[in-house]
Amino acid sequence: MPRFTPDPAALRLGEALAALRRERGLSQAEAGARLDMTSQGWGLYEAGRRSGLFRPDVQRRLTGALDSTPEALALLASAGESHGDADPSPSGVESRGRAFMDSPPSDAVRRLQILDDRLSPWAVSGVVVEYRPGVWPRRGQGCVIETVEGDIRVCVYEGGDAETIKVFGAGSLDRAETIARDRIRRLSAVTARIETS
């Protein structure tokens, strides 16, 4: 007999959390690392076997690590439940939805050459970085920022919240810069540094 039988609603919430994580292209370890949590801890939430999954503060924290919202989690969870004899054409609250920018396939790797030494010793002039558009960087990982003004910058990702991100490399690695998210068109993770001689 199992020690813990999860509630069906907790299972649906866990499955919805897993779906959000997979949409972002993250492993359980990468998602957990954004919250200083192990992959095992994250996996317990996804399996519906960790208490607190119904708490709003826990949902905000988990979905925030996935750059999502508790509302999106609830929508995914409710899509998985059976509604029995529900009216197939409900009338009520309607919304026009959200417009999302198309992103290239996650396997599309791009390259960019660094032309100065402001990221030294992480990367010096002449180093070519490979990055994957649409893949979110981890803390301490290189990132490529494409701004709405058309600028492309290479920095080291430090963290962020709903309105801003913090990066190092604003002139040198010891200077941090906070950038408003509404100024960023795309943030991509650097996956390789290629030294050129």
Image (spheres, grey):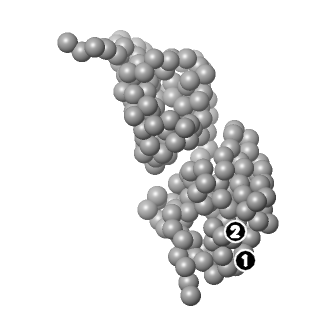
Note whether 95 is above or below 121 in the view shown: above
The residue at 72%/50% (across/down) is 166
Q: Which residue is mark 2?
A: 119
The residue at 46%/58% (across/down) is 106
Type of residue at label 2? Answer: Leu
- 157 to the left or right of 82: right
Q: Which quadrant of the figure contains the C terminus?
A: bottom right
Judge the density around disc 2: few (<14), some (14-19), many (≥20) Cα neighbours within 10 Å.
many
Nearest the camera: 180 or 118? 118
- 117 to the left or right of 45: right
Note whether 38 is above or below 92 in the view shown: below
Q: Position of residue 86 (x, y in %)?
A: 40, 14
Q: Which quadrant of the figure contains the N terminus?
A: top left
Q: Position of residue 121 (x, y in %)?
A: 66, 70
Q: Position of residue 10 (x, y in %)?
A: 41, 19
Kind of element beneath mark 2: loop
Note whether 80 is above or below 194 in the view shown: above
Whole-Å distance between the Cαs marked 1 and 2? 8 Å
Q: Which residue is mark 1?
A: 116
Note whether 50 is above or below 129 in the view shown: above
Judge the density around disc 1: few (<14), some (14-19), many (≥20) Cα neighbours within 10 Å.
few
The residue at 39%/34% (across/down) is 40
- 15 to the left or right of 110: left
Nearest the camera: 94 or 132? 132
Q: Are marks 1 and 2 in contact (CB under 8 Å)?
A: yes
**Residue 192 seen in render:** yes
Q: Position of residue 23 (x, y in %)?
A: 46, 44
